[in-house]
Image (tube, helix red, strand yellow):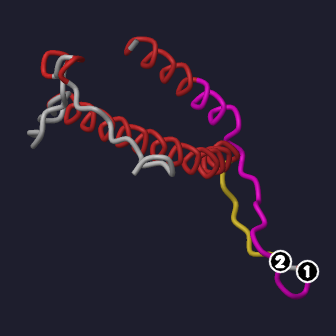
Amino acid sequence: MQFVRTAAWIVVTAILVAFMAMNWGKAPVNLWPLEGGNYIHFQWPVGVIALVFFLLGFVPVWLVGRAARWRQNRRISALEHSMKITAAAPSTPPASPDPEPAPTIETLPEPDKLPEPDKPNGPNES
């Protein structure tokens, strides 16, 4: 992958150098209008002007891309860190001691030994 990147940069550099060599004639660039129809301007070779304005467009986009990649790497690192903490923590919480165990079938009394329910006293009974 490094070879492909290096080859691409060599091609871009060769194209840029060829463009600058073919367009070395000076051209005026008007920056700001002044009173009386005059301008603040400078005269540079066309290739240099193209390079400067290419960089003015490329550098901000490149910086935004680097910032996005940096934020993404930080986010991935934070998620990996939280996964390590989660994996290191015990999966089940410690059991709390119950003060009174729930009755089981073995601890229930026999059906014939169950106490009789209280009968309500009706109007006929005294």
Q: Nearer the viewer, residue 123 or 28?
A: 123
Residue 4 occupies quadrant: top left
Q: Is residue 63 above or below residue 13?
A: below
Q: Is residue 29 magenta?
A: yes
Location of mark 2 (residue):
33
Magenta span of residues: 15-36
Query: Residue sitting at 72 percent across and 45 percent down?
Result: 25
Q: Nearer the viewer, residue 34 or 79?
A: 79
Query: Residue sitting at 20 percent across and 27 percent down?
Result: 91
Query: Residue sitting at 33 percent across and 41 percent down?
Result: 118
Q: Which disc is residue 37 wearing?
A: 1
Q: Give residue 22's position: percent from left, percent from top.
A: 69, 32
> Between tags 2 and 1, which lies in front?
2
Looking at the image, the residue that sits furthest to the right is 37
Q: Amino acid at mark 1?
A: Gly
Quadrant of the frame with the N terminus:
top left
Q: Secondary structure at mark 2?
A: strand
Q: Is residue 15 above or below residue 59?
A: above
Disc 2 and disc 1 in contact, CB within 8 angstroms:
yes
Q: Nearer the viewer, residue 86 or 120?
A: 120
Q: Which disc is residue 82 wearing?
A: none
Q: Give residue 30's position: percent from left, percent from top.
A: 78, 66
Rounded to the nearest angstrom, the CA distance separating label 2 from label 1 is 7 Å
Query: Residue sitting at 61 percent across and 52 percent down?
Result: 56
Q: Amino acid at mark 2?
A: Pro
Q: Nearer the viewer, residue 107 or 8?
A: 107
Local crowd size for mark 2, using a 10 Å CA cut-off: few (<14), some (14–19), many (≥20) = few
